[in-house]
Image (cartoon, rainbow, N blue to C red):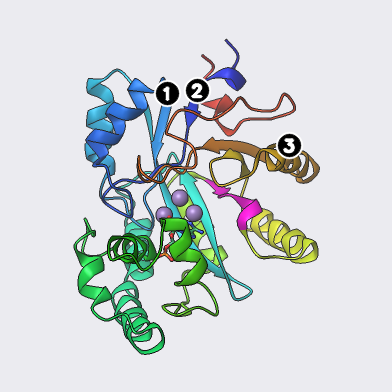
Amino acid sequence: MSALTLNVDFHSHSTVSDGVLSPTELAARAKRNGVSVWALTDHDELGGIPEARAAAAALDLRFISGVEISITWAGKTIHIVGLNIDENNPELIEGLAKTRSGRERRARDMAIDLAERAGIPGVYEGALKYVGNPNLISRSHFARYLLEIGACSSVSDAFKNYLTEGKPGYVPHRWASLEEAVSWIIGAGGVAVVAHPGRYDLTPLALDSFFRDFKAFGGVAIETVTGSHTVDQYDEYTKIANKYDFLVSRGSDFHSPEDAEIDIGKLPPMPKASKPVWEAWFSA
Ligand code: AMP
Ligand code: MN
Ligand code: MN
Ligand code: MN
């Protein structure tokens, strides 16, 4: 088997960020679904990695450590995945703690805005019921509560009507810089990967400028086959990766059995022209 056909899933979330399964439950689901190599990539958090690694080892599932860092670039929120990082690296730990620190204030402001502009009270307290890690309250937890009370008909509907730019519950936020995120990842021995590049609201010119900055800071890969891309985008971003000489990565971005675009381990194959980021780590 060549590296390209390995069932790699390098993007998933546990209760340590905005997923609904614990790292142990996620490992079991990944194994059951046929994953060969798995990475946990919680948002701005490394806390789930020791449990995930132990659970994977017990299942004879190959595991690499990961994280998905929220950054602000040219006023836009973008996500950078770090793979194969040392989760004990002090600069990475400190940088992520700083990145997380504004979430509590933002969540309270989001709830005030939802109460004032949409007439929906108590969303902060409601969202907290879904939070597994008090340091990581996310828009996903708000979306789950809005669904619970019938303010929307699905999680993705919650993001259409609330929580996004111009809608009630949206509060602009400044995350880490691109340079910080990439340097923390490299400093911790990892590789930096642009998460779901097709999902950002950037013009082609801005995306080009972003990729150049990312590369200049030491970024090496982009996601192509991800649950956050359309099928057409798998090939589109494979071509883009080759144009910029980036390696590629693959991951479901699985959060929850209820509202998954693609289940963990259930992604389609990589396009043939792919140069996978894991080729240097695993062959079969
Ligand atoms: P936050 O980091 O708190 O801004 O929350 C971002 C998270 O919200 C993402 O990681 C996704 O899990 C979720 N999210 C954002 N947009 C959508 C969407 N349109 N549909 C479903 N989930 C979304
Ligand atoms: Mn998420
Ligand atoms: Mn993301
Ligand atoms: Mn994600």
Q: Is disc 2's CB within 8 Å of ligand 4?
A: no
Q: Earlier in the sequence, mark 3 or mark 1?
A: 1
Tell me the quarter of the image containing the N terminus. top right
Residue at screen point 63% across, 52% down: 197
| Residue 135 is a magenta residue | no
Q: Residues within 10 Å of mark 3 (few under 14, many from 20)?
A: some
Where residue 72 appears, as percent x and y from the top left, is 54, 70
Q: Could you tell me the amino acid type at mark 3?
A: Asp
Where's residue 216, x and y in %?
68, 57
In the drawing, does residue 77 fall left or right of residue 214? left
Q: Is residue 197 magenta?
A: yes
Q: Residue tagged by mark 1? A: 35
Q: Which residue is mark 2?
A: 7
Q: Residue at x 54, y 29 (%)?
A: 278
Task: Tell me which amino acid carries mark 1.
Answer: Val
Q: Which mark is residue 96?
A: none
Left or right: residue 271 compared with residue 22: right
Q: Which residue is mark 3?
A: 235
Query: Mark 2 vs mark 1: which is more N-terminal?
Result: 2
Asked whether disc 2 touches disc 1, contact meaning CB atoms under 8 Å apart, the reply is yes
Cα–Cα span, label 2 and label 3: 18 Å
Asked whether residue 171 appears in the rendered view, the answer is: yes
Q: Nearer the viewer, residue 200 or 283?
A: 200
Task: Specify the segment rendered in magenta.
Answer: 192-199
Q: Is residue 110 left or right of residue 183?
A: left
Secondary element at tag 2: loop
Tell me if residue 255 comes above or below residue 265 in the rendering. Answer: below
